Image (cartoon, coloured by chain):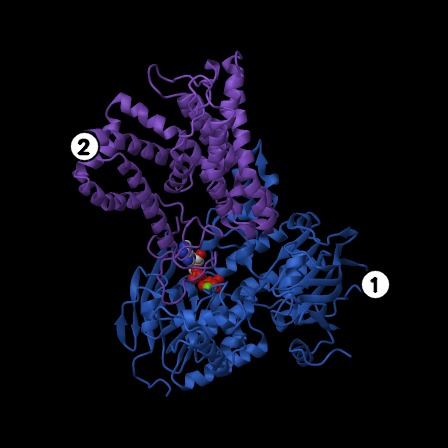
Amino acid sequence: MAGVPGSAPALELRGITKRFGDLVANRSVDFDVVGGEVHALLGENGAGKTTVMRIAYGLTHPDAGSVLVEGHEVAIRSPRDAIAAGIGMVTQHFSLVGPMSVAENLALGRASGLRLDLDAARRRAVHAAERFGIRVDPDARVADLSVGEQQRVEILKALARDCRILILDEPTAVLVPAEIEALFATLRSLLEEGLSVVFISHKLGEVRAISNRVSVLRQGQMIGTVAGSTDERELARMMVGRPMLGVERSAGAPAPSEAEPVLRIRDLRVDGAHGRPSVEDVSLGVRGGEILGVAGVSGNGQTELMAVLSGMRRPVAGTVSVGDLDLTGADPRQMTAARVGRIPEDRHASLIPDLSVAYNLVMERLDDFRHSGRIDERAIRAHADELIARFDIRASPDDRVAALSGGNIQKVLLARVLSRDPRVLVVSQPTRGLDVGATEYVRSQLLARRADGAAVLLVSEDLDELLALADRLIVLYEGRIVGEMSAQEADREQLGMLMAGRGRNP
Amino acid sequence: MRLSSISTRYPVSPWSTPALVLFAIAITFVITAGPILLAGANPIAAYAEFVVIPLTSQFTLLEVLVSATPILFTGAAVAIAFRAGYWNIGAEGQLLLGAIAAAGVGTTVGDLPGIVALPAMLLGGAIAGAAWALLPALLRVRFGIDEVVTTLLLNPVALLLVNGLLHGPWRDPVTGFPESPRIAASAEFPALIDRSRLHLGFVIALVVIATAWYVIARTPAGLRLRAAGLSPHGARFAGINVSRTLIVAALASGAIAGLAGVSEVAGIQHRLTSGLSPGYGYTGIVVATLGTLTMGGVVLAALFLGDLTVGASTAARSLGIPSQLGAVVQGVLLLTVVALLTLRRGNSSRPVDAGPPAGESAEHEPAPTEGAVT
Ligand SMILES: Nc1ncnc2c1ncn2[C@@H]1O[C@H](COP(=O)(O)OP(=O)(O)OP(=O)(O)O)[C@@H](O)[C@H]1O
Ligand SMILES: [Mg+2]
């Protein structure tokens, strides 16, 4: 039963205003979603999407405004109230308990009473995973899962709680195309049962594919609501206030073929969580002026490969070198000294969220910012002001990084790395969670590095991104390279097969 | 400030809330009213006696400073370690080692002038305290062995060492008591004010704290230490040698705790005794926690606890209640502060912007680092 016209919306937000000090994150925002509908919420990084939905879910309290469920005003003081009212939310960052198994995490959401029946929890987890078509290992320890896998558990946890209104804050950012399709199929069948979905995403194609209506926030204000079929250019224009262009590797730019690779990896092996190797026999080379794309479903060794190249993990076997420099087992300092710029997928863990933007921007090179033994606060500030302007970070130097929106956190890390002119750039999911404007910007920056002769290793689950940026592609499956091709000859279908572990390159 | 107090999506560090400490003090007074009533006194009168009376005469005021001196040292020692994410519970043992070294140096310097004897003692005490802190720190960074356990376990070992010396080679040859011989007169800390017990140690403590503040707040090394404590992974990623930072913090912590021992030997006891410290090392944890791990907070908290200590002993006389009630108040205070911090931190398991597990309280805090004091 889809929403009956004229009946009250499943969820309605009225006049929501939320201030953080001087900053108005939401300015009298109205929003509603009816039964059986997907209502997408779009907006640039920091537009206030997450904030308004956190208010609906009781994670934040508004300064003004009210929340109505089925036409009745409800007081939502905490997620407990929201869950009781039938609202579920998958947050942008996870709320899983790392040392516990997937099944235990699912049980936590619904545990009542003192005893936890683990067998039953496990059965329920398996059952829920089947019912919703989401592939997870119920016995895996959450801390051992990749970001993408953890996100899957999050979605499952919310679905398993039988909510009628499901808020998804960038749920697909970490999923691969096939999984997104599976999620959408799940959602569609749940929609038929009357579920309402609020869908926050930066991927306009997806938004158009699933949404009935689309609303756009800009700087905390509701710009308007349009039909889900509205074309992408128009949506982008509403979000940014100007038309967008789209960045691509200039077609036919000659891939430098004869040159020696700058970044070279030979026979790399990295051990995974349970002693079995997560990366095995990986050899690759990236030349200066080249972007090598690493495709694959997350959890197939990308995290470990990045950890080695970031200096955070020692390989069990194999070598890593940059130019003539052997960097096997190098630590982060040695990596930076060799001008290897590192942008791993987990930005929070790569920064110090409790320190200011300005400090985070200089954390790798504090010694350059000392003045007669003291921290040179003035220079640090000037440096921050400059990078904030250059990279269009929406924050002030003194803001704690933790208080920034997801996209701006990414920009802080990006600014820290790119401002040092890296010779080698290793990046994972650089545009995950970024709005269209920021995505365009980051991609153009990567291409600019490439034009400057840097060797870029780009790990991404986003095939569009890989095809738009990379010169060459390799596919990782279960820790091994199962395919290699030039971007020109790559075709989506074949890539998809390789990523799923089917078929090998002849 | 762009942080709201009610709905903290990205809350500030759990240590940095003076309001919470004041709240804890209020709760503590309510809770301890029970035992005070049982002891047959009026709680209001008792609190006035605990807190206010000591501040009303010069003699008691100076005694407050005397009581605050050792816990200024240990509070700063603990705060430095905790800021780095190194949970040093061993200040007590480190203090005792500092005291042993001070007595050792102090009884051997003989005729040397104070200008040589005092620095030698301070140096010896600091080195001894740091040395006692070294092993747990190495075990932590090399093998990941929890320093909470190891530092704690070394405390009784240090006390055994003291007693071993006092019942063996260092027994006072004149009296035969288990006390070391008196240290040389030149090795005694001079009194700051005539006919008071307030001694040089108080000034040294303030200098140490001011230095610690400067290093932590103003130098690159201090920023690295804070970074390592707030987010070890992020710090390591930025090229900071977190292991080395932890070791340095542990050694600095041990050295400062060692100075507390020197200060008690040279300023108060003038010899090594087994009852030298009624748990100053542990009180240091209370001071650091109450002081929200900041140096300014440590000074305030140490003075407050010094005030309570003096107040408890005068209250014992004037109201006829057991002087242990002062310790009870301190203990309850520590528990309420820790409980409030834990409550506010909630059940979030990931250190970064983790929404609370559904169904839990909306107020949550990221853990300051892995493994909080609790
Ligand atoms: N607790 C907080 N304290 C201070 N500022 C905050 C807080 N929470 C959010 N903000 C600010 O409010 C604004 C809106 O943030 P919000 O997270 O809602 O953006 P968003 O639209 O979800 O962005 P993104 O697409 O990057 O996730 C941002 O400028 C952010 O820095
Ligand atoms: Mg958001």
Q: Is residue A126 above or below residue A399?
A: below
| Label 2: chain letter | B
Taking B269 as reference, is B34 left or right? left
Question: Foreground residue, A455 or A135?
Answer: A135
What residue sits 43% from the left and 21% below the top?
A: B176
Q: Quadrant of residue A345?
A: bottom right
Question: Foreground residue, B295 or A463?
Answer: B295
**Dot 2 beta carbon under 8 Å from ligand 1:** no
Q: How many marks?
A: 2
| Label 1: chain letter | A
> Where residue B218 sits in the image (x, y, percent)?
51, 36
Outermost residue, front side: B176
Taking B280 as reference, is A7 left or right? left
Q: Colour of chain A?
A: blue
Q: Which residue is mark 2?
A: B319
Query: Mark 2: which secondary structure?
Result: helix
Q: Which residue is mark 1?
A: A258
Residue type for callout 2: Leu
